[in-house]
Amino acid sequence: MKASGRVILDKVFTVITGLSVILLIIVLLVILGPMLWRGLSAVAFKGTVEFRKMQLAEFAQGDESAVHIETAKAETAQKTVYEMIDRFKNGVDFEKLADRAKDIYRDFGEELQRKGLPREEYTELRSLSRKIRNELAAAFSSRDIGEINEHIEYVLKYSSDVRFKGTVAIQFFQMANNYKDAAAKIDLEKRDEYASELAELEEIIKGLFGPHPEEDSPALAQFRYGATRWDQAQNLLYKLRLKEKWVEQEPGQPLVKIALSRAELFAGTELKGLFGFVEKNLDKMLLPRWTFYWRYFVDDSTPGHYFGGIGPEILGTLMLTLLSMIFVVPFGVISAAYLAECARDNLIIRIIRMCINTLAGVPSIVFGLFGLAFFVLFFLPLFGAPSKPCILAGSLTLAVLTLPVMIRSSEEAIRAVPQTYKEASLALGASGFRTFMTVTLPAALPGILTGVILSLSRVAGETAPILFTAGIAVGPVPKSIFQTTRTLSYGSWDMAVADKLAAQVPHNQYGMVVALVLLILCLNALAIILRSRVFKRLKGQ
Amino acid sequence: MLSSIVPVSKEKSGKLALLHGVKEKSVVKPMKKTKPVQECACPVVEARNFSFYYGTKMGIKDITMKIQPCAVTAIIGPSGCGKSTFLRSINRINDLIPNIRVEGEMFVNNQDIYVKQINLVNLRQQVGMVFQKPNPFPKSIFDNVAYGSKLQGIKKRGDLQEIVEESLKAAALWDEVKDDLRKSALSLSGGQQQRLCIARALATKPSVLLMDEPCSALDPISTGKIEDLIDNLKKDYTIVIVTHNMQQAARVSDQTAFFCLGELIEYDTTTIIFERPNKKQTEDYVTGRFG
């Protein structure tokens, strides 16, 4: 090849190398960048007052007095909203009002009985209150404002009756008055419409601020505090202001999504002002503040992951990884030593080598099934342990998974040690075993550590082997190696596939994945540093 | 059980000579006169009809020679004539090679070392070896030299330090490395590494020292230092040195053996081999007509 041709080729290779590196960096940025960014949002975000409240309640973290003050402030601001809704409801939710009237009637009856009135008076008052109740019910269910006023007037006639003074029955009259005011304001035709719109509105408000102050907290704890993130609150605010609907704009054409302003839906009622009020005062109601939630990596989480951190998952991954390394490194190195030093080149050894090489490529789900069949169902009962998935079975499975890689790289490393070291050691009178332990093995250590690094990365991220042998999606932090554990890999899979509730807290998915990537990076970095130090010492620097 | 390969008597171990500085080395030394054979406590190395085969290929055939104790014996000959094979047979380091076959006998101190009951560890501690390419372990200088002593069971720090110092002085390396024995052995130069290997071999207090072309990978200055070293050591050790360099053989040795194509052609004092060889082959080789 002519010199000029060689120079050109050299330049071409340099350019290709540079481009490959740049391409790799771009790919990494494109894939990892958004993931890291979103995962970051699990740790650094605008935390609302609910977040601080939950931290205090679940993990006893935070300044108690400060949280109480803030909670009080937020609740005051939120109360206005609820009051607005309540007032509107009083005018609209006639079923509830009717039920309430029935309750008052019943309570009044009990009160009369307790008073011990003479029979006649009792009957009279009872039938009177019954009449009042029915009038009210009629008023509630009527749509004609004239009719309503008639019924109300009839009821209010008895408001000044002495017999009702100081009893439960005065609530009848309060209801009547409220209803009269409310009914005057709203468009009764639209009452049914309002009912359904109101239900939707209430859902959104509940999502923003939690349940009504007077309601009992519902059993599903996730609704206790609703959205704990500022940006989710923003989403809800959008939904609050605008209602999305599919309409057919032209016949025969696909439906088009349009957004209607909810404020318009409630036009002419008291609730119209609600929307602007919420929008303007959301700050005061939720009190967001920039939070750096480093405890995300330490805290346990509430079921469903809607609050808390991923501490148990990280712990589970670490335990499985380290335990499986403890199993695989001795077995791998000893097997490699045997194959490199002692094994003769006969048929059996060749078959063993072929098996090892083949096993390196077996899919990990097969190892998972093997682990279930062998370790969980057969091996554990041999030692008296219950035949259930546990960390021990999981790490043994992972160890078996990564054993071929470990054996291969260790054998390479041991073979790469120069024969002259061995000769020198033997010539000084060392036995073969002594030579191996004091000369060959230390010299092969960098290569063995490389194998450890490769195995570590693979094991930390594996999901299939621990599906049946150690992983669970929801469960307590394990106290012994005979229990199951949550892990980052399993948790990520579960949140993406199985857990429907998880869609409400997407930051957890990103957080788990980012934590996994960072964990593997850290483990790798440690191992690489260790390896380079050993290497430098070997080379005499 | 092997009892006849005994460690060298205790009085000898204190008598490692101290070198007084490093002599200048530039000219070919004149041929030496043969030393008078002294009373020597070193075991005698003797081969009787010794043959060595690599599988079916012959390495050396029918060698009968007696190595003189407390003297330097050089083995010379063209490449591939079996010099190294013979040398490595003396401490049985050839056993590492698979598929070997041995015929005849090799005696070290009247004990055939190719019998089943032989204690190889003892043998190799008695018969030390220095290889062609310097091969210090990737450890510190101290750990390299102390390696053999640790094998012998010496554990105390003070004892080990004494032995290391003695060996390094005997190998003419002490002055150059005494400041930092913790330094890695791989950071030394080639000549220093080879002297370190010699010190390492000396630390086990062997009585026979086998040297397989020890200077072929070194520069002339280092070569000179090592040749001086050999000169000083031979009072207390039996040294067998394989070399390509005939001038070196002439300078350093008392006895010389000439091998060719796996057979011992001639074995006599150095003076005779180089001035008045008996066989024509020998004469052709030493005068440079072939080789």
Image: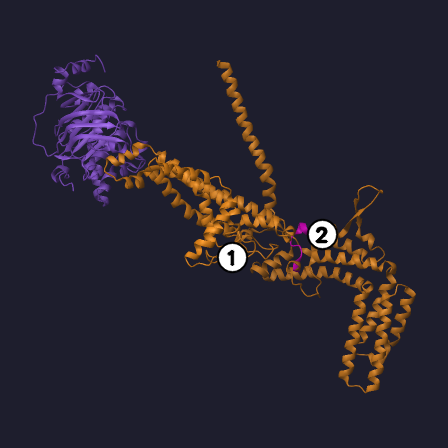
Chain colours: A orange, B purple
The residue range painted magenta reads A224-235
Which of the chains bears the disc numbered 1?
A: A
Disc 2 residue type (three-letter): Leu
- Whether residue A482 appears in magenta in the rendering, the answer is no
Residue B192 figure quarter = top left
Q: Is residue A58 left or right of residue B119?
A: right
> In the figure, is residue B268 to the left or right of A221?
left
Residue neighbourhood size for the residue with mark 1, other residues' Cα within 10 Å, grouped as few (<14), some (14–19), many (≥20): some
Judged by its main secondary structure, the magenta piece is helix
Mark 2: secondary structure: helix
Q: Quadrant of residue A205?
A: bottom right
Question: Relative to residue B213, is residue A202 drawn left or right?
Answer: right
- Mark 2 crowdedness (10 Å alpha carbons): few <14, some 14-19, many ≥20: some
- The residue that mark 1 highlights is A477
Q: Are marks 1 and 2 in contact (CB under 8 Å)?
A: no
Which of A174/A456 is in front? A456
Give, as a three-letter code, the residue at label 1: Val
Q: Is residue A456 above or below residue B202?
A: below
Name the residue carrying label 2.
A236
The location of residue A455, given as percent across then percent down, is: 46, 42
At 78% from the left and 58% from the top, the residue drawn is A198
Which label's residue is closer to the chain start, 1 or 2?
2
Q: CA distance from mark 1 to mark 2?
A: 34 Å
Q: Position of residue A284 (x, y in %)?
A: 70, 56
Comparing labels 1 and 2, the label whose residue is closer to the camera: 1
In terms of depth relative to the viewer, which is nearer, B14 or A140? Answer: A140
Quadrant in the rendering for residue B17: top left
Q: Secondary structure at mark 1?
A: loop
What residue lies at 62% left-to-right and 56% top-to-bottom? A51
